[in-house]
Image (cartoon, rainbow, N blue to C red):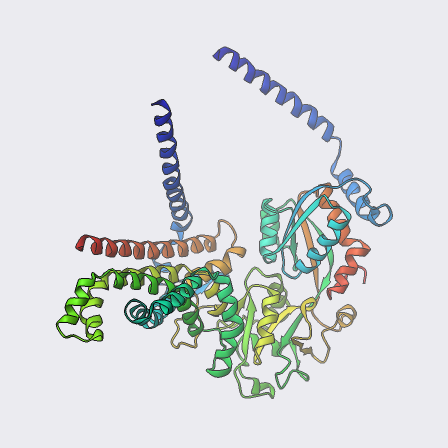
């Protein structure tokens, strides 16, 4: 009895080894360059040929709340084209997106900032694709007496967020304390804000600033707080809040494109290793004309805009 | 016979499994959090992950401030309510109040937090002052959450005082209020205490609703006024887990916060079961 089990196990192991060798032999010839070539070809061909093949399976997408609305809408449209595909999108912040994609917990990560060197060291096999561009707007409540005229320099913004300017009357407004809201530390929007505004002025965010964990929450609190100020993705700016001018320049897509508005950033998605067929198809869709028009409608700046 | 022992063994495995899970969680928590449980952590005044500073004191003080305040409010409202329900309310009114209190148990904490953020926070900001997100807002939300615990347990304790005590007291010429104060409350005290301790435990572990209204300053400080903002142990974990780097001091510090929270809640649960035991052995 026991002898038979042993020989059975032996056969199984031998079969496994042979299978692996054959499998490796088949997969082997596809070199690094060949993989890249396949990849670019697929993405370029999406528009002209489309995905005629049948796609099915599930995809999990997570990370930046800035990229989340684009991915959510693209996922909805993509699932109409490919009914057997199921995509779930969640907004957990750029840092979490890099980490979970790098660790293989999710299929596609999203970030609204560049992947930094410490992350590349931890997750060297991430492959990143740009989706489009965005900016960061400084927002106040529309009923604030300064709202329609608010025009700040980058230095003034840094002074407000570091607590040096802490009353609206220092800017010519009502005599009331400024309520400063900030994002949590893993946020890509926070990182971009620090890079463009705080770090050049050697300032850090005041300790009493209230922490919010998404663009939507930042917009909601400022919409309800007459004396609040916050920074959010340009794509999230709507009529419930008012975006301040920076050195006389309005925060609009056109001004970001022309370079007059000083803050720009690239929106990224990435996979651990080269994307598989389904991941590739979805990323290609987001980069295609259909995906880029979604991005534009949501208030972001398309790749070739 | 064989079937019976098989079933017995299966039940044993299930029992073993549930306690095994508890041990796994404790071991995991200790293993990940212990490296951060240093003297600096327990006495530090600054929590700033960006600068690798992990001091728990402002968060701990903020947590206790919020929790004890909320329980005080819940006691001030809940115990008179329980006395009214147990002794004075007509049958139909008692049914109405009691069932609405029980509905309160079923309100998910995120819904309460939403109510707090959209209704209470602007109200406080416009009528009382400050930023609105404050300890006061957290007190009110938490008090609403633990009211049902305190009301139902206290009412049960009051009602379980033997009817003879009441009739004896009234026969001696005491008024109804004197009976409540001198006879019923002392007799029901251990039950009421158990309700309060359970309420404390619930308030301490509550995350979502508090996170939404308590303000969470970037670098927490020891609150000095009820319109100040504060950080809770739970809200800090909830905000920061998403960006901690696995294996960093920050991750260990967050798990250490979890250990502190776990120890506090366990102590409260032990106290509660002790109080309940004392009550049952006294009878």
Q: Residue at x 21, y 56 (%)?
A: B279
Q: Is residue A260 left or right of residue A201?
A: right
Classify residue A12 by image quadrant. top right
**Quarter-of-image position of residue B15:** top left
Residue beneath the point at 82% across and 56% down: A289
In the depicted view, which residue is nearer to us: B173 or B192? B173
Q: Residue at 57% of width from left, 86% of height from top?
A: A170
The residue positioned 71% from the left and 57% from the top of the image is A73
Residue B217 visible within the image: no
- In this view, the residue in front, B247 or B139, is B139
- Please say if B55 is above or below A11: below
Figure label count: 0
Instruction: Please determine whether, in this image, residue A117 is positioned above or below residue B99.
Output: above
Residue A8 image point, x, y percent: 56, 15
Question: Left of B216 or right of it: where is A298?
Answer: right
**Residue B20 placed where, x, y %?**
38, 39
Residue B39: x percent and y percent? 34, 58
The quadrant of the rendering that contains the C terminus of chain A is: bottom right
Front residue of this view, candidates A68 and B80: B80
| Furthest residue toward left | B172
Q: Position of residue A272 (x, y in %)?
A: 65, 45
Q: Is residue B10 above or below residue B267?
A: above
Please, which residue is most extreme toward the right here? A48
Task: Answer whether residue A209 is visible to the viewer in this image.
Answer: yes
């Amino acid at each position: 009895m026991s002898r038979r089990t042993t020989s059975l196990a032996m056969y199984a192991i031998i079969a496994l080894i042979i299978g692996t060798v054959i499998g490796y032999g088949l997969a082997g010839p596809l070199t690094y360059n060949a993989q890249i070539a396949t990849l670019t070809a697929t993405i370029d061909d999406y528009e002209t040929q489309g995905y005629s093949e049948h796609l099915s399976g599930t995809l999990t997408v997570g990370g930046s709340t800035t990229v989340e609305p684009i991915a959510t809408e693209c996922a909805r449209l993509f699932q109409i084209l490919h009914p057997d595909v199921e995509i779930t999108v969640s907004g957990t912040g750029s840092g979490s997106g890099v980490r979970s994609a790098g660790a293989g917990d999710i299929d596609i990560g999203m970030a609204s900032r560049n992947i930094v060197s410490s992350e590349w060291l931890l997750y060297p096999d991430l492959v990143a694709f740009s989706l489009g561009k965005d900016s960061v707007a400084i927002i106040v409540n529309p009923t604030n007496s300064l709202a329609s005229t608010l025009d700040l320099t980058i230095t003034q913004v840094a002074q407000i967020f570091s607590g040096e300017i802490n009353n609206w009357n220092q800017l010519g407004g009502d005599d009331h304390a400024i309520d400063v809201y900030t994002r949590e530390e893993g946020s890509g929007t926070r990182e971009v804000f620090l890079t463009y505004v705080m770090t050049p002025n050697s300032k850090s965010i005041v300790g009493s600033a209230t922490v919010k964990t998404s663009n939507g929450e930042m917009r909601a609190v400022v919409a309800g707080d007459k004396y609040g100020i916050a920074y959010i993705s340009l794509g999230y700016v709507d009529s419930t809040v008012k975006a301040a001018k920076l050195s006389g320049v309005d925060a609009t897509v056109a001004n970001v494109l022309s370079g007059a508005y000083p803050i720009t950033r690239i929106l990224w998605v990435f996979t651990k290793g080269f994307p598989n067929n389904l991941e590739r198809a979805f990323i290609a869709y987001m980069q295609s004309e259909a995906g880029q028009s979604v991005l534009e409608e949501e208030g972001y700046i398309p790749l070739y805009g | 016979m064989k079937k019976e022992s098989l079933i017995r063994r299966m039940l044993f495995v299930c029992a073993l499994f549930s306690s095994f899970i508890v041990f796994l969680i404790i071991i995991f928590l200790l293993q990940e959090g212990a490296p951060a449980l240093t003297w600096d952590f327990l006495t530090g005044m600054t929590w700033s992950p960006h600068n690798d500073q992990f001091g728990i004191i402002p968060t701990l003080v903020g947590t206790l401030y919020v929790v004890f305040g909320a329980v005080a409010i819940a006691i001030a409202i809940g115990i008179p309510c329980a006395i009214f329900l147990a002794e004075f309310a007509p049958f139909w009114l008692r049914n109405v109040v009691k069932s609405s209190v029980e509905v309160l148990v079923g309100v998910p904490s995120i819904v309460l937090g939403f109510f707090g953020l959209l209704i209470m926070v602007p109200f406080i900001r416009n009528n009382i002052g400050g930023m609105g997100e404050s300890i006061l807002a957290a007190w009110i939300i938490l008090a609403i959450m633990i009211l049902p615990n305190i009301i139902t347990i206290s009412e049960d304790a009051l009602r379980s005082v033997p009817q003879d005590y009441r009739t004896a007291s009234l026969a001696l010429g005491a008024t109804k209020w004197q009976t409540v104060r001198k006879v019923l409350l002392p007799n029901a005290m251990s039950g009421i205490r158990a309700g309060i301790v359970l309420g404390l435990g619930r308030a301490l572990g509550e995350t979502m609703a508090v996170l939404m209204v308590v303000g969470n300053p970037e670098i927490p400080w020891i609150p000095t006024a009820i319109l100040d903002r504060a950080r809770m142990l739970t809200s800090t974990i909830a905000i920061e887990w998403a960006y901690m780097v696995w294996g960093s001091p920050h991750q260990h510090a967050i798990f250490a916060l979890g250990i502190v929270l776990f120890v506090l809640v366990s102590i409260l649960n032990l106290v509660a079961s002790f109080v309940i035991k004392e009550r049952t052995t006294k009878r």
